[in-house]
Image (tube, rainbow, N blue to C red):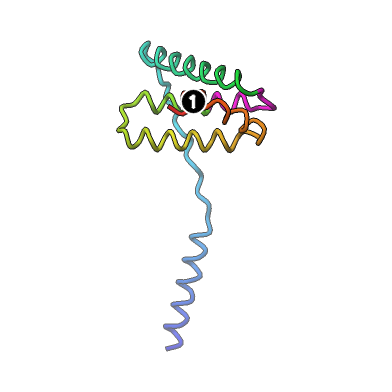
Amino acid sequence: MKKIVFLFSVMLACGLTANAQQKKAAKPVKQEVQQTPQANADAKKIAEAAAKDVAALGKVITFTGTQQQDFMGLFEHKHRYLAQNLSNERKAILSQSIEAKINATLTPDQNAKLAKSPETMKMLIN
């Protein structure tokens, strides 16, 4: 019985020691992605549409800090998803998400100004 307990403890100790070794991570292989002219044109359209949305929002409110850059990223995200063929349900969910992010990013004064312009908000979320 003592031999079995001893062998079990030795196996357990060796097993824990073997697991404690760190493996060297393999270097990731970088693949160069060549963008097609179509992808470049799509990216340009998305950036232009996002800039248009930011300009429309800028007419209603004045940006503070990094809000302009934040909204540019948000609207690029929105237009990237809208470029895909989404169902009406997914578009509605996306609109709700965009509206929530806009309201969360703006200050209460900015939200009040935007609330006075519902057509701008409708344009921004659709």
- Check the image and report above or below for 8 versus 58: below
User: Residue lying farthest right?
Assistant: 65
Q: Quadrant of the N terminus?
A: bottom left
Q: Quadrant of the C terminus?
A: top left
> Going 44% across and 84% down the picture, which residue do you hit?
3
Image x and y of residue 77, in percent: 47, 28
Q: How many marks?
A: 1
Per the image, label 1 sits on a secondary structure element best described as helix
* Picture quadrant of residue 57: top right
In the rendered image, which residue does mark 1 sit on? 124
- Crowd class of label 1 (few under 14; some 14 to 19; many from 20; radius 10 Å): many
> Going 43% across and 33% down the picture, which residue do you hit?
95
Relative to the observer, which residue lies in front, 85 or 40? 85
> Is residue 71 within the magenta segment?
yes
- Check the image and report above or below for 47 versus 105: above
> Is residue 41 within the magenta segment?
no
Relative to the observer, which residue lies in front, 7 or 95? 95
Image x and y of residue 93, in percent: 40, 38
Image x and y of residue 120, in percent: 51, 23
Q: Magenta stretch: give its range.
A: 62-73
> Going 50% across and 49% down the picture, which residue do you hit?
23
- Left or right: where does residue 116 sit relative to residue 27? right
Relative to the observer, which residue lies in front, 38 or 123? 123
> Going 37% across and 32% down the picture, which residue do you hit?
91
Image x and y of residue 6, in percent: 47, 81
- Check the image and report above or below for 60 versus 16: above
User: Residue lying farthest bottom?
Assistant: 1
Query: Type of residue at label 1?
Result: Leu
